[in-house]
Image (tube, rainbow, N blue to C red):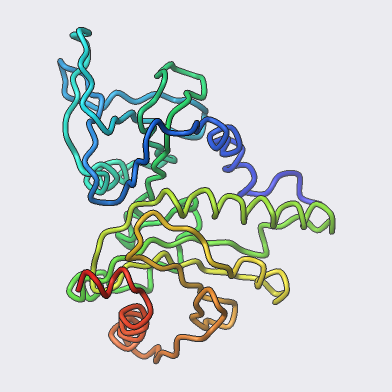
Amino acid sequence: MKEVSNFLSWYEKVNFDAQKQSIRKPAEYLNLSYYSIVYVQVHSSTKDFYQIFETEGALTTFAFTAKPTSENKEFIFEEYTIGELSLILSQNKIAQLVKINPVTHDQHKINQCEEIIFCPLKDMNSKQLTFTALDQTLPLMAIDQKKVHSMSFEAVYGFFRDSDFPTDSAARTNHIFKMIHFIEFALKRIPLKFGSSSVICIFLDFDNPIEENQFIQDYELLDTYSNVIFVNNNLEIVNTYRQKIEYNGDKMETILMPIINWQKDNNSARQELL
């Protein structure tokens, strides 16, 4: 049996369990989205973001939904949309968290806050965004970034694979639950730009279809105009109801257009915006 899988090692270094527990009930309904304005804590001298390592596996930035009034001359608060902030932070190589309305901002501790934004990272080879570890992004090399950009197709990708599982049955089941809990935590906190299509695409590489199907479910997302879709072990694209989105894999247009058309027909929030 494997001692610790790559996923579990990454998960525990970020300490997602403790991060989830750090979120307390907000004072008022936040209604955050990609386009929400926040005020980011920056060093007044350098204008760099104030960032700390709450854990060894994640770098945390702090932002507020209302501009703080502070006499501390060491920091100022600059205005960004959540989407702008996320794209800037995506250039890093380790997990990036944004604590919204933090209670404290102390180094080497999990600081309480009213919400967390989980920023996807940019794979520098494919130029695509991923919400899982950067060492799993090889399939993204097949994506034609110029074509994706010209079609205004917005996506964040995640990768979950059978080879990352322990062989012990009980440990394997626990591992699946840990992955699903992570997906639940992450997807409702990932900002996604409005495009011709806006999807979080999860690649599932499992030999056992029963295990694979446990991942295919309806997840809460941050932006209501977005959807989650899945690419299974047979390279079928399916939605949360396990319905296939038929496509032709010969070129990018015939892969993306069926997704664009499916989302346009099935996302009511998107229909209101178009």
So how many labels did they put on this image? 0
Which of the pair 192/219 is nearer the observer?
219
Which of the pair 86/7 is nearer the observer?
86
Horizontally, residue 123 falls left or right of residue 12, namely left
Horizontally, residue 180 falls left or right of residue 109, namely right
Looking at the image, residue 39 lies above or below residue 185: above
The location of residue 48, given as percent across then percent down, is 21, 26
Instruction: Name the outermost residue toward the front.
Output: 28
Horizontally, residue 201 falls left or right of residue 43, namely right
Which of the pair 244/56 is nearer the observer?
244
Which of the pair 99/12 is nearer the observer?
99
Looking at the image, residue 195 lies above or below residue 233: above
Figure quadrant of residue 77: top left
The location of residue 256, given as percent across then percent down, is 32, 81
Q: Quadrant of the C terminus?
A: bottom left
The location of residue 15, given as percent across then percent down, is 58, 35
Horizontally, residue 246 falls left or right of residue 81, namely right
Residue in the picture at 32% in, 67% down: 198
Figure quadrant of residue 80: top left
Residue in the picture at 43% in, 58% down: 221
Looking at the image, residue 140 lies above or below residue 131: below
The location of residue 110, given as percent across then percent down, is 51, 24
Residue in the picture at 34% in, 25% down: 51
